[in-house]
Amino acid sequence: MGAMVGNGSGVGAGSGMNLLLGCLTHDDLVVRAEAGRLLGEVGSARAVGLLVDYVRTDGHYAKMTALRSLVQIGDRSVVDDIAPLVDDPKVFDDWYWHGCKSVRAAAAVALLGLGSEAGVAYLEELAEKDDDSFYAWFAAEILRMPAEFEAVDGLQKRLTVEAITRRGSRGIRTSDPGLLCMEAEALGALGEESGREKLEELLKFRSRYVRGQAALSLVESGANDARLAMIRQLAEGDVAAFARMKASFALWRATGDDEWLDRIRSTAAAAEEWFEQAAGVELLGQARRASDVPYLLGHLEHEQWYVRACAVEALDRLGAADGEAAALKLSGDESLRVRMQVGCLLASREEA
């Protein structure tokens, strides 16, 4: 089914923030987590109290999105509220990455982002154990932090190329595609030659997601002409549209040549898989090129809700009046997730 408009449950003027705040208590844990993420994009202090309530009481690891949002909003008064999560994250301890360790680490990293060292000891404990939560999940975030504290500098010094790319305590950091994407992002932030050599290897990894992230990270790390040629080969010849588009975006970042954005648009338009179509929409939104507005508008009526949501977010990024007006027509979409994205657009304008 396509988008539905005006079904009586739409997002009206002045209600974007209320919709997102209300979704923090939704029955669906993914909806709660997405509300937490979007409230960080809005960046309003109005969300702080309910975000704190959410991270303190919700029992699922997906609430990590809200911890990052609290850092984005930047209200340091919440430090004492979230510090207890480092010791007691209020989630089931399943002895795996998606259990309590990840929330404890997320709380510790959020505290650092808010100017508190209260969670440093736990991050150091994870580092000593060669844990994936430190060396993959939060490595890039820690590396991008300004070294305002000696503790941050100490954590960053632990994140060497050798440490990031070794097998890890569970032995899967060299094989798991999800972890390798995170490692590739960290290597890009690290910007060292040995890291660039590792990223060259990841350009040939079996997962399209890893190849795409490796291309982006190689550009961030400082690719020379020879490495840009390798990324170009990926952009022009990879078997997966997703990897070709990510590599094209990397080349656009490196060169500023809009030819690569045109290639993303044509690749996405020809893609049979709706997820790859959505990936193209997302990348074009990140590029913020006004000439892509008509293409993005065409995806507001896509049969897949995820593509529609990506189109709304992309048009929000571009800020074009006609694009925003068209996106607001989805305020009554059949998908709550699309209505939430419209709510984010409205809330951002309401809070500006």
Image (tube, rainbow, N blue to C red):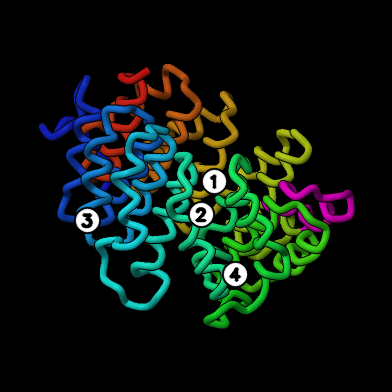
Which residue is identified by label 1? 280
The residue mark sitting in front, 3 or 1, is 3
Residue 233, image x, y percentages = 78, 58
**Who comes first in sequence, dot 4 or dot 1?**
4
How far apart are the two marked residues, 4 and 1, measured between alpha carbons?
18 Å
Nearer-the-camera pick, 142 or 278: 142
- The reply to whether dot 1 and dot 2 touch (C-beta < 8 Å) is yes
Which residue is identified by label 4? 207
Q: Quadrant of the C terminus?
A: top left
How far apart are the two marked residues, 3 and 1, measured between alpha carbons?
33 Å
Image position of 148 with respect to 171: above or below: above
How far apart are the two marked residues, 2 and 4, measured between alpha carbons?
14 Å
In the image, what residue type sits under mark 4? Ser
Question: In the drawing, what numbered circle is on residue 276?
Answer: 2
In the image, what residue type sits under mark 1? Gly
| Mark 1 residue element | helix
Residue 11, image x, y percentages = 20, 29
Which of the 4 quarters of the picture holds residue 156? bottom right
Residue depicted at 63% across the width and 73% down the height? 206
Image position of 45 with respect to 278: above or below: above
| Mark 2 residue element | helix
Which residue is identified by label 3? 58
The residue mark sitting in front, 2 or 4, is 4
In the image, what residue type sits under mark 2? Glu
